[in-house]
Image (spheres, rainbow, N blue to C red):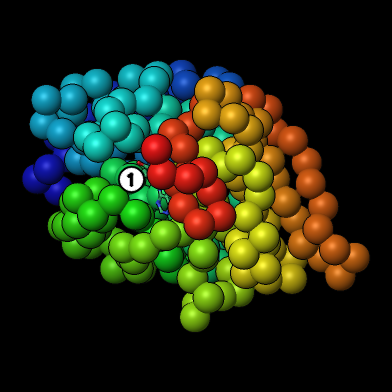
Amino acid sequence: MEFDSRKYQRLRESMVKNQIEARGITDPSVLSAMRRVPRHMFVSEALMDQAYADHPLPIGEQQTISQPYIVAHMTQALQVDSEDRVLEIGTGSGYQAAVLAEIVYRVYTIEKKRNLYIRARKIFDQLKYMNVVTSYSDGTMGWREESPFDAILVTAGAPEVPKTLVNQLAMGGRMVIPVGNSFSQELIKLYRDEKGIHQTRLGGCRFVKLVGEHGWGEE
Ligand code: SAH
């Protein structure tokens, strides 16, 4: 791959070892996906050398690509496998969707900012992620025509869990979503079975706002 130099491969390997394995991520499919996706391709050229560092980075439009560990943590929490159809809300740079695309059957990802949507679509095509389907719309409404989903991942902070999304979860489906105020949130995991919806807490986090019909209002 001409876009993936030895330098970036080395940085990526040490990212997985020192930031992800070292902090307890063990799912082999998550670790190998993080070893494969060229994260530097999802940021602007000026930031490529920082792409494998232990923090989020700006991607324009006041949005950020999440810290590598957070991506690994959320992906592991979703418990996805090669047959799953997964919905992501908040395409952003496209990096999280690409990590999921390495593992699952198909990823449906929604972005409400046009420039980010266009840029992410281009990079999915360039890197040949044929199993990523993109939409330019308000993700808090979900994607009814393609529902139900085996897993739903929200990568922006919500004031509460949108019911529209819970309703699009398949039986046995999992959802991971940051819920809280605009400064800090808690990562919540929901699981649907015959008895109903079960919730567990996965710890604190900080995401940009989920803005939409069933999220925060526009500023
Ligand atoms: N998953 C991304 C990071 C997401 S940052 C990555 O890997 O880079 C959060 C993204 O959610 C931003 O791009 C923001 O524009 C988007 N967003 C916020 N509210 C949204 C909504 N209602 N529907 C779809 N996207 C939304």
> At x 39% / y 20%, what residue is drawn?
55
Q: Ligand 1: does it lie within 8 Å of the C-beta at label 1?
A: yes
Whole-percent x, y for residue 166 in the image: 67, 62
Q: In front: 133, or 139? A: 139
Position of 197 compared to 138: left or right?
right
> Residue 119 versus residue 30: which sits nearer the camera?
119
Provide the secondary structure element on which disc 1 rests. loop
Q: Residue at x 74, y 71 (%)?
A: 171
Is residue 180 rendered to the left or right of residue 199?
left
Q: Which residue is mark 1?
A: 92
Q: Quadrant of residue 68?
A: top left
Coordinates of residue 113 in the picture (x, y in percent): 28, 51
- The residue drawn where x is 22% and y is 35% is 60
| Residue at the farthest right position | 195
Q: Is residue 16 left or right of residue 36?
A: right
Amino acid of disc 1? Gly
**Visible residue check, residue 76:** no
Residue 98, compared with residue 172, is above or below; it is above
Q: Nearer the viewer, residue 202 or 162?
A: 162
